[in-house]
Image (cartoon, grey):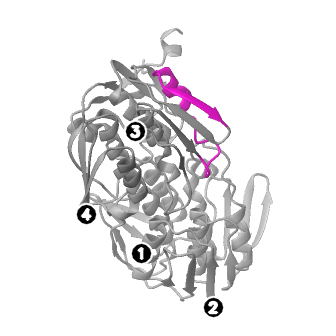
Amino acid sequence: MEWNCVERYQVQGGLPLVGTVKVGGAKNSILPVLAAALLNESREEIRLQQVPALGDVRAMLSILRCLGARVDQEGEDLLLQTADVDCDHVPDALMREMRSSIFLMGPLLGRLGRVRISYPGGCAIGLRPINLHLEGLQQLGAVIEEKGGCIEARGRLRGGEVTLAYPSVGATENLMLAAVCARGSTVINNAACEPEIADLQNFLNMLGARVSGAGSPVIRIRGVRGLHGGSYRVFPDRIVAGTFLLAAVLTRGCVTVEEVIPEHFASLTKLLEEAGAEVERGAAAVTVRAAEPLRALSRVKTGPYPGFPTDLQPQLLAALTLADGSSTIIEHVFKGRFHHVPELRKMGARIELSGHRAVIRGVRRLSGAAVQATDLRAGAALTLAALAADGESTIAGIGHIERGYDGLPEALARLGGRISREKSVPEEVLSS
């Protein structure tokens, strides 16, 4: 008889992480780039270089194949042929696997003039309304109906001026993708300024689009008739880089991240310096040393770039559980971004929650425990805490973590962490 085994991380904490790690392509760049490939109606191939092996990437590739794209792999490179894409409907099961599937609305509308999707899934980190996406697409000429749990949109898009009520990364990228092949010119005001927006602009322009202003609050797109093939490598992942640096802080080690763009995560390194860590910046590398406990940070607030990213908040909160004094983190982006707090409390952390505010009172040590990853970044935070804790920890729900981290336990082990991926049979199976 075959059992359905569950994978988890097994961690023996207490060792400092020391060494160098190279950072791969950004999850939050590669997903909209993959969606953008749908706009290439030519027979020319698109090569995406050194694509990270992530759960979300696999899910997006499954969607592209469903829509009629051909996807091949050569080592770490992906080869995409999208000339035969003619399907406008994304199966519900695939849509619900990840939030980023919403990016498909813009390119499918721009190419086919129609699209039908269900509401997207993803991490359980609170409400992430898609009204900004839908309102923006309507202003570009789309007719949208919501019925039976699905969203149907149709219409030949035309350029226009759209002002976002909030600088949403996803809405900005979706509108960029919709406007690339629309008739006329489009202006997106109050656009998100994250580096991933500039990365998408660079990719689109390499394919023949005419986009300018990404990285600023105003983006301008002049519609073109079609795109062509080309070769591209996305930006390095600033969130992965920050996660490794915070691992150094938690374990009182010294870690260098290489092949990065240091200014992309400057908000983190400035906070680490404020808290007493030693930071060295190079042209494409950052080193953090933390031989002593951090000093508490009186007030950290998440916000749009260049503010402190919500995707690093759980990992920073984990680091502050061992800081000297009381710290406060205010989460202004995702309402449900504190699911890691009850799990950290199991390890001995002292954290009080009040609405979107967390007060962290530093303790001398954490203790190993069995914890559950409830979302991607929460899982990363628990992994880092386990590496610093006394004794052994097990982390379940690692599928969430591997949506956004390629080979995380292996990379941490190379830095000296005692961590491995193991399989186990669920207790309910054993007791049946």
Badge 1 amino acid: Phe
Q: How far apart are marks 4 and 2 (CA)?
A: 39 Å
The answer, for residue 82, to whether it is visible in the render is no
Left or right, 55 with respect to 300, comes to: left
Of marks 4 and 2, which one's residue comes earlier in the chain?
A: 2
Residue at screen point 61% across, 60% down:
102
Q: Do the residues labelled 4 and 1 touch (CB within 8 Å)?
A: no
Q: Which dot marks residue 203?
A: 1
* Closer to the eye: label 4 or 1: 4
Q: Which dot marks residue 284?
A: 4
The residue carrying mark 3 is 295
Q: Distance between the residues labelled 1 and 3?
A: 41 Å
User: Along the line of sight, which residue is nearer the eye, 212 or 112?
Assistant: 212
Left or right, 214 with respect to 319, comes to: right
Q: For residue 176, what is the image quadrant?
A: bottom right
Above or below residue 74? Residue 416 is: above
